[in-house]
Every structure is written in C-alpha cells, then in structure tokens.
Image: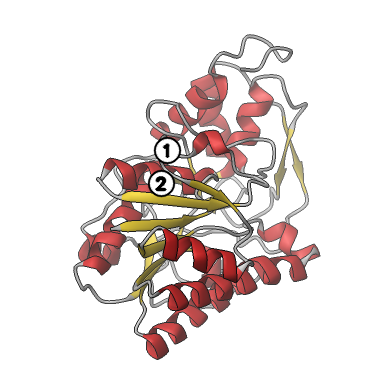
Amino acid sequence: MTILVTGGAGYVGSHVAHALVAAGREVVVVDDLRTGAASAVPPGSPLVELDVLDTARLTAVAREHGVTACVHLAGLKNPGESMTDPGRYFKVNVSGTLSVLEALVAAGVRDLVFSSSCSVYGAARDLPVTEDSPLAPVSPYGLSKLTAERMIEAFGAAHGLRWMSLRYFNAAGASLDASIGEDWGPTRNLVPLLAKAALGFRDEVVLFGADYDTPDGTAVRDYTHVVDLADAHVSAVRHLADGGASGALNLGTGDGYSVLAVVKGLEEVAGVPVPVRFGERRAGDPPVVWSDPARAEQLLGWRARFGLPEILATAWAWHARGVTSPGSPS
C-alpha cells in the first residue's frame, strides 16, 4: 500500500508523512517546495517536485508508484490573506483539489484523506463545534475548504472514491524529537511568531483584537498538537482501507485557549518576555472556536494526547535548537 502525500514537505504534511512511514506505510511525497522543505520529507521516501494543478504529471506519479491512497494537504491556509486575495485561494485550494481528484480517478486510486479546516464552520454560535454545526465560512479560505469537501463528496458518489475530510482546529507544536517543525519564515501562525520574537528575530508580534467577548478580550482557539493531527491521518487511512464509511470529522482537543494564554505560556517555556502589541481585529477571524472531537474518537479511535503545554514545549525546542543569538540561527 503506497500513499501519495500532497504537500508532504510542508508543516503538517511532513508530520503526516513521518507518521505514515512509522506505521509501516510506503509514502511518495509531491510538493512544489514553495513553503515546504525537502529536508522534512522522511528519509528514503520519494519526493517529486510538482504543482498539484499539473493533473497529468500527478496522474503519472500515482501510476508509477502504484498509489492506492492519497492524503491531500497541499494548499494555502491563511484566512486573513484570503480576504485580500480570494482568487489565489480558490485557484490553489479548489482547482488544486479538483486536479488531485481527477488524477486519483484516472490512476485508479480508491481512498482519499483530505486536509480540511474548522474554518468551514465560520463564527459558530454554539460551542463546542460538532460535525453537525452549521457550515457558514466567513473567509474565502473557509469557503475554499468547504467547496473542496463538496467536490470530494461528489467524486465519491460518481466514482466510488472513499474519503474522509479532517477539519483541523489550529495545528501547532513540533515533532517530539525536535527534528521537524513549523518554518517561521512563511507562516503567520501565532506560536512560531511568538517563538521568533522571543529569540530576538522579530521586534514584536501583533495580536489581532483585544475587544472580543471573551474573559481577556482576545480570541479563543482549540490548539491541536501536530503530532496528534498526524496520528489522526494514519487512523483515517487505516479506516478507509478497512472499508470504513466516508465522512467529515473534527480534529481538536475540545479545549479553548485565548491568544493571551498562549503568549503567557510561551513566555513561561522560553523564560523571557515576548514583545507584543494589540492591533485591530483581522477580517475573517471568528472570536471563539473549539471542537467536540467525540465523533473522531468513535469512528477512528483517535483522541488528542497532548495539550497546550506540550505544544509550546515542543515548538520552543524546535525553534530554539542551536540558537545562541539573533545573529546565529541554526
């Protein structure tokens, strides 16, 4: 059983690829390396540099390697950026997913696990968010993920493709051995930006919004360890291979933490203050989101093992490895 991992040189994708290899699966990674790193791909696993919009090449790769399942993670993931450049998000996330689907059908691949997002729910009125919560994205990013989910469902009905859409709730953290983690260069995620500032490579971090209706005024999110997310993908691949039902699942911890709680937690781990300032709310950001992960536990036997302390500890170990001063990053 060979698994095609699109975006497998990226942050979540590389963790998924490593977890699949550790579970005894053969993996082939495709990535355009615009934000991914070849060094993050598991040793011995083939890496093919290509854009998933190239359907013909993607089909050829799937056929050449005898792919029987795909984990599709390639895409753009910044809700705020999508508000100012929606066309790019629809092209990459929607057209890219369509290309992947067409390649899988052409190559006779039977199973697909899709990297989706809690952004499909938008500003949820009732918490925690369940899979039955209304789907009402507030950003083009969220809409692109929901559109991709609908296309996958249609391909399943038309072509017999078995699928699972995994809706992430704020991936964070790094591998437990600090060998792979999130590159703070291209990302706009909170934890790597805080680590960058704590290490002196950034003057400050802007926190978007201090007037939300939350205990400390900052937005609340369900931060989920990337290692837990990777394990869920392995379970989803196994579930489909065993003939399990298709569907969408939330991947989260069931706990919400405010932005300020994350800042204070990182300061405790780093042992230094982190320079921050408050800015205006960011368009497309809901105030409060956290998940009900019960269905993932029921269907996949998956439950998050790690919480915010482990997220921050592993992220700090990854970012601080070998760094002695702002002039000497590892």
Q: Are marks 1 and 2 in contact (CB under 8 Å)?
A: yes
Res. 67 in view: yes
The picture places residue 27, in percent across and down from the top left corner, at 38, 50
Closest to the observer, 28 or 167:
28
Residue under label 2, please give it: 17
Q: Is residue 232 left or right of residue 258?
A: left
The picture places residue 28, in percent across and down from the top left corner, at 43, 51
Q: Amino acid at mark 1?
A: Pro
Q: Residues within 10 Å of mark 2 (few under 14, many from 20)?
A: many
The picture places residue 62, in percent across and down from the top left corner, at 44, 63
Residue 201 to residue 77: above or below = above
Q: Is residue 268 left or right of residue 162?
A: right
Q: Residue at x 49, y 49 (%)?
A: 8
Q: Amino acid at mark 2?
A: Ala
Q: Residue at x 74, y 27 (%)?
A: 202
Residue under label 1, please give it: 42
The picture places residue 78, in percent across and down from the top left corner, at 66, 56
